[in-house]
Image (cartoon, helix red, strand yellow):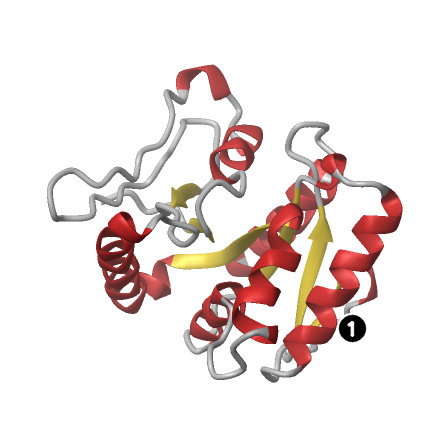
């Protein structure tokens, strides 16, 4: 078994998880695409590794935002992911929860505003991972697709809505050291590589911590 620690990348469908995975790899051309496929009824989850990468990457299949005909399959994927994390959470030194900034308003409108009895998928995911004490960073991706004004508005909406579910989200730069109750976020663009170096830096910091 590979002894490298693992980085978890998780989020709804089409938020840019695979693009972020490529950016973190020393040799992205050797990465042929999504590793975590779903052949048949069993979810196949494999670590992505390269010789010069000091950790494995587990890019879990996305779920959510599916048509009615795909809902059963999406629920199956979600269940298998829960089982995987419950079984393997100690393998993960860090988790990236990837959010598509273009979908923040739609998700909160559907789950938070129209139906107060449901919890938005993103917040459900964060609360679930917090239970296993996996250090988390929320990546708010695709900021290149919105104006700066809309970026500020959508992130503010996301942060304030999270408080309703007991989740304290702050920008990575403003997070207090050793405050494990706060979940940091980073505005990001996989396309433009915005804040990629900041992401790599925090990953390295956490790697250094577990090596002590």
Indicate the quadrant containing the N terminus: top left, top right, bottom left or bottom right: top left
- In the depicted view, which residue is nearer to us: 116 or 131? 116
- In the depicted view, which residue is nearer to us: 117 or 21? 117
Q: Residue at x 54, y 66 (%)?
A: 110
Residue 167 x %, y %: 62, 78
Residue 157 x %, y %: 74, 66
42 sits to left or right of 133: left
Whether residue 138 appears in this view of the structure is no
Q: Residue at x 83, y 65 (%)?
A: 174
Indicate the quadrant containing the C terminus: top left, top right, bottom left or bottom right: bottom right
Residue 187 x %, y %: 73, 49
16 sits to left or right of 190: left
- In the depicted view, which residue is nearer to us: 13 or 66? 66
Residue 132 lies in what quarter of the image?
bottom left
Residue 182 lies in what quarter of the image?
bottom right
Residue 158 lies in what quarter of the image?
bottom right
Q: Residue at x 77, y 40 (%)?
A: 146
- Image position of 65 with respect to 182: above or below: above
- In the depicted view, which residue is nearer to us: 150 or 132? 150
Residue 126 x %, y %: 51, 68
Q: Residue at x 37, y 49 (%)?
A: 66
- Counting the numbered discs, the total is 1
147 sits to left or right of 145: right
Q: Residues within 10 Å of mark 1 (few under 14, many from 20)?
A: few
The furthest residue to the top? 29
* Residue marked by disc 1: 176
């Amino acid at each position: 078994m590979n002894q490298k620690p693992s980085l978890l990348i998780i989020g709804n469908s089409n938020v840019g998880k695979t693009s972020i995975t490529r950016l973190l790899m020393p040799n992205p051309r050797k990465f042929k695409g999504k590793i975590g496929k779903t052949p048949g009824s069993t979810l196949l989850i494999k670590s992505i590794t390269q010789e010069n990468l000091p950790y494995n990457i587990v890019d879990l299949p996305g779920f959510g935002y599916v048509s009615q005909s795909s809902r059963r399959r999406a629920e199956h994927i979600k269940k298998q992911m829960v089982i995987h994390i419950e079984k393997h959470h100690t393998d993960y030194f860090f988790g990236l929860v990837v959010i598509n900034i273009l979908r923040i308003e739609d998700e909160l409108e559907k789950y938070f505003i129209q139906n107060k009895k449901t919890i938005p998928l993103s917040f459900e995911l964060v609360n679930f991972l917090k239970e296993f004490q996996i250090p988390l960073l929320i990546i708010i991706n695709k900021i290149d697709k919105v104006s700066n004004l809309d970026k500020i508005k959508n992130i503010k909406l996301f942060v304030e809505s999270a408080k309703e579910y007991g989740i304290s989200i702050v920008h990575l730069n403003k997070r207090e050291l050793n405050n494990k109750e706060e979940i940091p976020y980073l505005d990001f663009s996989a396309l433009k590589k915005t804040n990629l170096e900041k992401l790599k830096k925090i990953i390295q910091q956490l790697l250094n911590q577990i090596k002590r």
